[in-house]
Every structure is written in structure tokens, then in C-alpha cells.
Amino acid sequence: MKYSRLIIGLLMLLTLTGCVSIDGMNSKFREVDNVWTIENQKLDAKYYHRTVDATYEVTFDAVIKTFNDLGLPVNKSSFEKGYVITRNAAPKPLSKEQWAEVREIENPKVKEISWMVEIQKNPKDQFVTIKASIENHGNQTDVNLDYYLDAPKYEDMGMIPPRQAPPHAVKLVSKMFWDKFEKNILNKEQ
């Protein structure tokens, strides 16, 4: 809490003294977002996509169970339209240790873009949305994951933080999701 207030206070001070403007911060956030977008697009498809030999019904249920197993509440879903959405405070489902690993790997890249931007030690003011899109192909079903970030507290101040998740976080969360998902699909088919 103190760290978050300190950062906000520092940003306000820098903004008031003319060193940093909200537009300047947003410009740097967009640069980070662009870098993460490109890096995430370069990730192997295994992080985002699976085709499973299971019916649509079994797959849909397994996706919901997987989110629940990871401690991620399902906020919205549509069986008819083929999606399940979860939104939760960051860094969940990552542990503090995994989040520290993300910071260690991603912060040096972010600092190359700007000294003003840093992945926070405690991202409690940010939210992670994961959308699983599910497509029926008879006895096979496709599952695609998309990740989005938002930070209403900062957005209320006029800042537009990155929407893309840090690439290393995407890798870690995807591995967690797919490992649980594969177990849940096996259990559903038995």
C-alpha cells in the first residue's frame, strides 16, 4: 500500500513539476504494450491453443473446472457462444514467487523502454482477464486463451497502463492452465 502511494505520489509530483505528463506516461505504457504484443505473438501456439479429442460439452465443463481449480472465478460464460471469462486481481493464479520471477525477467526489458515504467512488486491494483474461446468440431474441440490487463485505479487518473500481459506471465499461467485442463479432460472422459 505504501509503495503504491509512493509511486502515485512521485508520478503526481513529476507531473506537476513538468518532468512527466500523463500523456508521457501513457506513451511509454503504449510502447510497453506494443513490445509485449509482439513478444506474445511470437510465443509458441502451445501457450494459447489446444485441440482436444473430446466433445464440446466435456471441453466446456473442463475449462470451467480448470479456472475454478486455479482459484479463478468464472465471471461470464456462454455455452451457446463458446466462451468462458475469468477476471481476478493480479497476479493470481501466479504465486508471489512466480510473480517475482516475472518481474525479474520482464523489468529489465521494460526499463529499456522507460525508467518511468516498472512491473510492480504487488500488482493488487491490476486485474487479469483470461478468456477461453471454445469451438466445436464434432469429436474434437479447439480451446484458445486470450489474456488482458486493466487497472481501473490508474485509468481513473487518466493513465492507460499496458493491456497485454507480460510474456513470461503468459507462459507461466498457460502452463498452469493446460496442465490442469489436460487432467480435467481425462477425468471427464472416464
Image (cartoon, grey):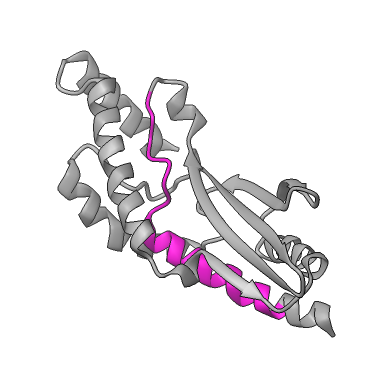
161 falls in the magenta region: yes
Instruction: Residue lying at the far right in this picture: please name it.
Output: 190
Give the number of marks.
0
Q: Nearer the viewer, residue 50 or 155?
A: 50
Residue at the (22%, 25%) spot, across then down: 24
Asked which quadrant contains residue 2, the reply is: top left
Q: Which quadrant holds the C terminus?
A: bottom right
Q: Is residue 71 left or right of residue 177?
A: right
Residue at the (37%, 39%) spot, across then down: 3
Residue at the (43%, 28%) spot, across then down: 154
Q: Which secondary structure is most common in the magenta stretch? A: helix
Q: Is residue 181 above or below residue 17?
A: below
57 falls in the magenta region: no
Residue 102 at x, y = what percent? 37, 61
Q: Is residue 83 left or right of residue 123?
A: right
Instruction: Residue lying at the far bottom in this picture: please name it.
Output: 190
Q: Is residue 166 above or below residue 97?
A: above
Asked which quadrant contains residue 9, the reply is: top left
Q: Nearer the viewer, residue 73 or 136?
A: 136
Q: Is residue 109 left or right of residue 76?
A: left
Residue 51 at x, y = what percent? 62, 73
Q: Is residue 12 above or below residue 60?
A: above
Residue 137 at x, y = what percent? 71, 67
Residues in magenta, as a range: 159-183
